[in-house]
């Protein structure tokens, strides 16, 4: 009987794969990657500079030509192998996610699961990258539309769901024959980039097809989006940075998921007990650090007080603490800057008249674990008007369904949203009036196991992530006409 032996753990995360070689960055500064729960150092990484960016793109451009001509099954097998490695190294990867992101193990297990699903779905894309034969009005002429890889993709990913939010662009981009130069967030360089590079290397991805460069946005991020080699920039992050990318990228295809201010609307006929449970999850999952998280709960006046009482009771009972403890629901925020930002918005909201009905001071070894904060206010207070990205929620009363819709749409963002009602048709009609890329009827605006499609409107982004949309986003069409017999020209 064979005995399973766990693979040797990945190491050397002080280096990064640049141009096909794992090495330290050539920059002058070093990044200290810390655990948000206890503040311990995870790794120290000498950062990349502009020379590293240029090398990564030059190598990617050369490697992409061969990768694009590889057989579909070769690309598919690499992605299937990566999905298998996610299973084989499950505990190792979960350990990295918990320690580097500071998020509860339950959330990390979900993230690992949807990341595997992304790789498996992408493994089918090489065989479904189809073209078209189009009719012609010219005798003897055939019009063929070939679908080809876009080329090289510049990928900049965030820290809130680093493994998944990187993979949802990385896996399909590789599947259809592109090369990728990836810059993960500085708070999660391992789980957002270096760990995935190790996995794909073990899975058989040729050297140079993926480079990971760790560094600041100002030093290498701007250089990446403005670089002449990539034809696509894929970015997930804040709207302010996204606007900057549109100004710096030049003529490139932009695929961006930006900020959110999701309204969770509870109509007067909603199942109140169910709505309370969904709202608690939708507001505080991952300590509220998700772009699709509920940022505002809009409740019909007739059930407002009853909802507030039940909601506060449920949220107050959530376990706050060590993310490695399976019972923990809310762990630390990612860093001290983010904590100060959340606290500043809460203070500003209170100064503007919002009432804090549940609160508490930061706790934990690193002092970054903020208990859930619940405010009662209007749509104009800071915690409602701005994206909080932390464990704070504002509850707003609406006098009618029409007013609830008006409040929901009164934001510059349009990513995710939700509405609760016992009448499904009423819910769908309401949903279609919400100006958002996604609206969920009787479900949280955060669908943690749904990897089929994401995308926003207004200031929340461009393009669609996930599902079969990815084939369109990461390929280009090439029209080739074939004249099978001589034609008669007009002159």
Image (tube, rainbow, N blue to C red):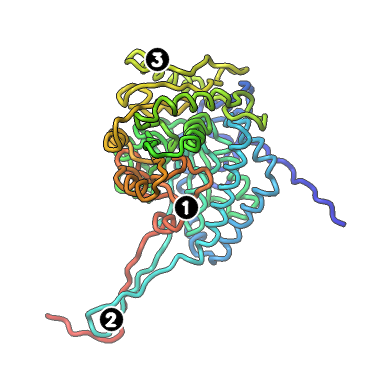
| Disc 2 to disc 1, C-alpha distance | 38 Å
**Residue 372 visible here:** yes
Residue lying at the far right in this picture: please name it. Answer: 1
Looking at the rendered image, the quarter that the C terminus falls into is bottom left
Residue ID for mark 3: 347
Q: Position of residue 470 (x, y in %)?
A: 44, 55
Q: Nearer the viewer, mark 2 or mark 1?
A: 1
Residue ID for mark 2: 141
Q: Position of residue 154 (x, y in %)?
A: 43, 45
Residue ID for mark 1: 452
User: Helix, strand, or loop for circle 3?
Assistant: helix
Which of 11/306 is in front?
A: 306
Which of 280/309 is in front?
A: 309
Which of 277/304 is in front?
A: 304
Looking at the rendered image, the quarter that the N terminus falls into is bottom right
Q: Position of residue 31 (x, y in %)?
A: 55, 27
Which tag, 2 or 3, sits closer to the chain's start?
2
Query: Residue at point 38% right, 46% down?
Result: 438
């Amino acid at each position: 009987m064979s005995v399973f032996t766990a693979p040797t753990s990945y190491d050397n995360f002080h280096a990064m794969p640049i141009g096909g070689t794992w090495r330290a960055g050539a920059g002058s500064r070093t990044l200290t990657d810390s655990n948000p729960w206890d503040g311990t150092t995870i790794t120290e990484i000498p950062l990349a500079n502009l020379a590293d960016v240029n090398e990564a793109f030059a190598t990617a451009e050369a490697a992409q030509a061969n990768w694009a001509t590889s057989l579909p099954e070769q690309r598919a097998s690499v992605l299937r192998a990566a999905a298998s490695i996610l299973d084989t190294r499950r505990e190792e990867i979960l350990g990295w996610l918990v320690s580097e992101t500071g998020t509860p193990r339950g959330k990390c297990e979900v993230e690992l699961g949807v990341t595997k699903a992304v790789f498996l779905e992408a493994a089918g894309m090489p065989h479904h990258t189809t073209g078209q034969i189009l009719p012609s009005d010219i005798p003897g002429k055939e019009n063929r539309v070939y679908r080809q890889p876009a080329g090289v993709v510049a990928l900049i990913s965030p820290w809130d769901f680093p493994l998944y939010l990187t993979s949802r662009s990385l896996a399909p981009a590789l599947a259809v024959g592109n090369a990728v130069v990836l810059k993960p967030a500085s708070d999660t360089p391992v789980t957002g980039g270096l760990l995935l590079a190790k996995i794909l290397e073990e899975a058989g991805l040729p050297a140079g097809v993926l480079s990971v460069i760790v560094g600041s946005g100002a030093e290498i991020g701007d250089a990446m989006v403005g670089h002449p080699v990539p034809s696509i920039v894929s970015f997930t992050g804040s709207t302010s940075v996204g606007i900057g990318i549109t100004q710096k990228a030049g003529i490139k295809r932009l695929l961006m998921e930006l900020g959110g201010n999701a309204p969770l609307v509870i109509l007067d006929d909603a199942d109140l007990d169910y709505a309370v449970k969904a709202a608690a999850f939708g507001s505080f999952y991952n300590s509220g650090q998700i772009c699709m998280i509920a940022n505002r709960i809009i409740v019909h006046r007739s059930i407002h007080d009853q909802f507030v009482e039940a909601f506060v009771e449920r949220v107050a009972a959530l376990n706050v603490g060590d993310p490695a403890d399976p019972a923990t629901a809310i762990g630390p925020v990612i860093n001290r800057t983010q904590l100060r930002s959340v606290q500043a918005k809460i203070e500003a909201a209170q100064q503007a008249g919002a009432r804090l009905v549940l609160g508490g001071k930061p706790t934990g070894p690193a002092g970054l674990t903020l208990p859930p904060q619940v405010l009662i206010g209007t749509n104009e207070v800071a915690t409602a008007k701005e994206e909080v990205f932390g464990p704070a929620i504002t509850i707003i009363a609406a006098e009618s369904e029409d007013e609830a819709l008006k409040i929901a749409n009164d934001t510059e963002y349009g990513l995710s949203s939700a509405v609760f009602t016992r009448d499904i048709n009423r819910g769908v009609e309401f949903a279609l009036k919400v100006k958002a890329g996604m609206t969920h009827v009787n479900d949280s605006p955060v669908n943690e196991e749904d990897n089929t499609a994401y995308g926003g409107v207004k200031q929340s982004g461009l393009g669609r992530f996930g599902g079969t949309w990815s084939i369109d986003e990461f390929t280009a069409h090439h029209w080739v006409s074939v004249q099978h017999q001589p034609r008669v020209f007009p002159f």
